[in-house]
Image (tube, rainbow, N blue to C red):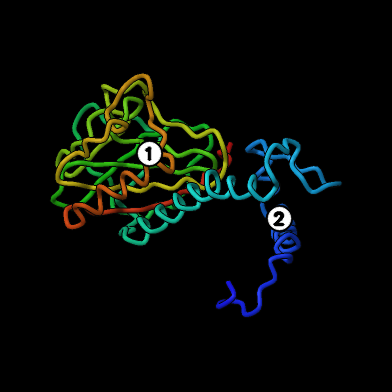
Amino acid sequence: MDKKLGAFNEQSINPTLAEVLKKLKKQFGEEMAKNGIHWEHKRGRPADDKQSPWRIAYGWLWQQKFPYWQMDWLWQTLIKKAASPSHWLRFTPDSPSRGMVVPPGKKNDPPVIGLGIPYYIHVELDCDQQHLLLLNRGLDTNYVVCPSQAFAPVNRLKDKKILMPQSEAMCEEITFDTVGQEEFLAIVLDDSLDLSWLTPNEEEPAPIWNPERLKELWTRLGEDSNNWQAFYRSFEVVEASA
């Protein structure tokens, strides 16, 4: 520190820590409170002061804030690698045809989903790979849509298409109960990934992808970087018109 800062006075570290803690509390106080760290403003210490305040703040940054910051970074990095044509993912409120199957007309539907309306998801991808991983990110949720027991236990594309929910799924329809942005990221691979949390089961009908799981997925994709493609599209969930 002497080389970096010139003359460094060790006695000044406590005021420096105090200033850093002050800025951390101002910036992240609400997030810390959600994780059970409540600061007493009179002394500037958390309610549970078994540890020094700076150690508690450091622990929160490393154990709580950093994993989710890393998850956000990985998500955004995957989006940057993704193609975003408007036609690859569609939501239709009508039930799928039980008779002659006619392809939908080519049109650019607005990326809007109606609140509380039952939907089917149509995925159509013009690529050679055969297996689909579809991740969803909402306001406070991170779900694996496919493969999942809830919506799509079979993740193999048939004629480059998948319709969800599938007949073998637990759900008969897909609805949204909160307004806001819903993001969808598809990863198409030659083979399914043998990750335990991607095995459809009724105990976790729609697996939640968290920092640990997304990092595991990122590592596996990095090991086989030439054999997958990504696609991205976002929708806005709005109040359904009467």
User: Residue sitting at 45 percent across and 39 percent down?
Assistant: 142
Q: Position of residue 42 (x, y in %)?
A: 86, 46
Q: Nearer the viewer, residue 191 or 103?
A: 191
User: Residue sitting at 38 percent across and 31 percent down?
Assistant: 207
Q: Earlier in the sequence, mark 2 or mark 1?
A: 2
Q: How many marks?
A: 2
Q: Nearer the viewer, residue 235 or 44?
A: 44
Classify 10 Å Cα crowding around label 1: few (below 14), some (14-19), many (20 and above).
Answer: few
Which quarter of the image is occupied by the C terminus? top right
Check whether the beta carbons of the residues at disc 2 and disc 1 lie within 8 A of each other. Answer: no
SS state under label 1 = strand
**Residue 20 horizontal side relative to residue 142, left or right:** right
User: Residue sitting at 57 percent across and 50 percent down?
Assistant: 61
Q: Is residue 205 above or below residue 140?
A: above
Would you name the residue on which mark 1 appears?
92
Q: Is residue 134 above or below residue 66?
A: above
Picture disc at residue 61: none
Q: Nearer the viewer, residue 54 or 207?
A: 54
**What amino acid is labelled 1 in the image?**
Thr
Q: Position of residue 16 (x, y in %)?
A: 71, 63
**Residue 99 horizontal side relative to residue 44, left or right:** left
Q: Residue furthest bottom?
A: 6
Q: Nearer the viewer, mark 2 or mark 1?
A: 2
Would you name the residue on which mark 2 appears?
21
**Residue 229 horizontal side relative to residue 241, left or right:** left
* Residue 163 found in image quarter: top left
